[in-house]
Image: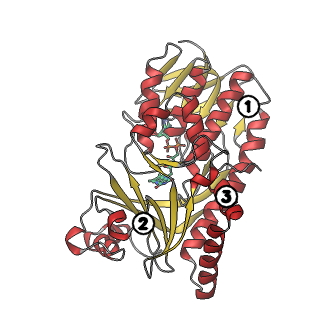
Amino acid sequence: MQRRNVIVVGAGPVGTVAALACARRGLTVTLLEAQERIDDSPRASTTQPPTLEILAELGLIDEYLRVGLVSRTFQFWDRATLKLIAEFDFARLAGETAYPFVVQTEQHKLANMAIVRLRAMANAEVRMGARVTTVTQDAESATVDVNQESLVADYVIGADGGRSTVRKSLGIEFDGYTWPERFLVITTRFDFQAALGCCLRNYMADPEEWTNLFKVAGDDLKGRWRAVYNTRAEESDAEALSDAAVRARLSRISVPESERHYLHLNLYAVHQRVAKSFRIGRIFLCGDAAHVNNPIGGLGLNSGIHEAWHLANLLKSGGDLDSYERIRRPLNIKYVQEQTIANKKRLEERDPAQRAQRFEELRAMADDAKRHKAFLMRAALLEKS
Ligand SMILES: Cc1cc2nc3c(=O)[nH]c(=O)nc-3n(C[C@H](O)[C@H](O)[C@H](O)COP(=O)(O)OP(=O)(O)OC[C@H]3O[C@@H](n4cnc5c(N)ncnc54)[C@H](O)[C@@H]3O)c2cc1C
């Protein structure tokens, strides 16, 4: 392949969807990934209804459903008392979407299944172990330097994650902040649904230490749970990852002593940042390269996939390229940044009166059909601005 239409940098879930969407529209595409294989550590899994619609259009939905778990509801709990506060049911979105539920499918499964499709297409090329070092452009084309080679394309999509080389190459600022605490994900086989009577997606509020519980299928499809906690700002990484601290955290959500073993630990810093610009000339940013946020509510990756889809359609149609940033950047700020910050505050509220009021608001919303649906439309990224 000489000059191609599109080079996508980064084979995470967003880059692979961007590459597959472009290739299925007949564009010639090269996907470049720095690592030799897709990172399968526990990261995002919650896939919202409009994202499922995109995966259906890409021909991935059957496999996606087969390797994931369908979750129709999500619940809010008071962790201190382990009492259910409110449940929200995506069935209320019937008529708004063909998929009135979320699917919990680990993000590496999406990247891997898209790569399999791309490898079978004559107009697509996937290169693993291909770390891009610089991206440049002129009026005619964009050039990517990778492994002592320069590749030329009409357009480049930077989907190379939060530390994006493409973004840095363009000198685009990444405004925002980093939360003082980190998030700890404990993966365990302990069955929280059986033990607590919760559903597959649960948000447990607590002023000192909140917990979110999600079930995923796992690569063996046998099922496992991810318990996500905030750490204390002053807690060191070593302390948070120590066996004693992990077991203590499990004990605080009622896991009996004999069952406090775990399969995996993941500790990561959490940011709220949005790139000053999502495009310069022939080069675009997509997914975490363009914005990062806390994962509460499962919105960041979904919005990245929506961007990849939007961009592939735009590049194919030759439409107004300025519209990408004009539409996508404010959407991310309004629906992803604002919502994830509000979601986090709801879980960690310290003032007892405010806390009681937030619980009351959730109960009232769940009980009112119109408000219940409106809340879900926004939470599922179905609301249009
Ligand atoms: C540790 C961690 C845990 C997370 N946990 C959750 C969670 O529990 N829930 C949730 O909703 N979200 C979570 N997130 C966020 C979610 O994983 C991201 O929103 C999602 O990965 C974004 O996808 P992406 O494709 O934009 O970027 P990424 O998944 O980061 O993919 C970027 C890809 O680009 C490649 N790359 C980077 N630089 C180059 C280069 N120079 N050249 C070529 N390739 C390059 C990388 O190797 C990577 O494969 C987590 C993120 C992290 C970092």
Mark 1–mark 2 distance (CA, rounded to whole Å): 49 Å
Lower sequence index among marks 3 and 2: 2
Residue 352 on image: x %, y %: 58, 87
Residue closest to the eye, 342 or 233: 342
Residue closest to the eye, 78 or 325: 78
Q: Is mark 2 within 8 Å of ligand 1?
A: no
- The local secondary structure at tag 2 comes to loop
Q: Say which amino acid is labelled 1.
A: Gly
Residue 52 on image: x %, y %: 55, 40
Is there any visible trace of residue 289 in the rendered image? no
Q: Residue at x 29, y 72 (%)?
A: 255
Lower sequence index among marks 1 and 2: 2
Q: Which mark is residue 160?
A: none
Q: Which mark is residue 281?
A: 1
Q: Which mark is residue 198?
A: 2
- The local secondary structure at tag 3 comes to helix
Residue closest to the eye, 90 or 131: 90
Mark 1–mark 3 distance (CA, rounded to whole Å): 40 Å
Residue 312 on image: x %, y %: 65, 28
Mark 3–mark 2 distance (CA, rounded to whole Å): 21 Å
Q: Say which amino acid is labelled 3.
A: Lys
Q: Is residue 150 above or below residue 179?
A: above
Q: Say which amino acid is labelled 2.
A: Cys
Disc 2 crowd rating (10 Å Cα; few below 14, some 14-19, many 20+) is many
Q: Which quarter of the figure has residue 261?
A: bottom left
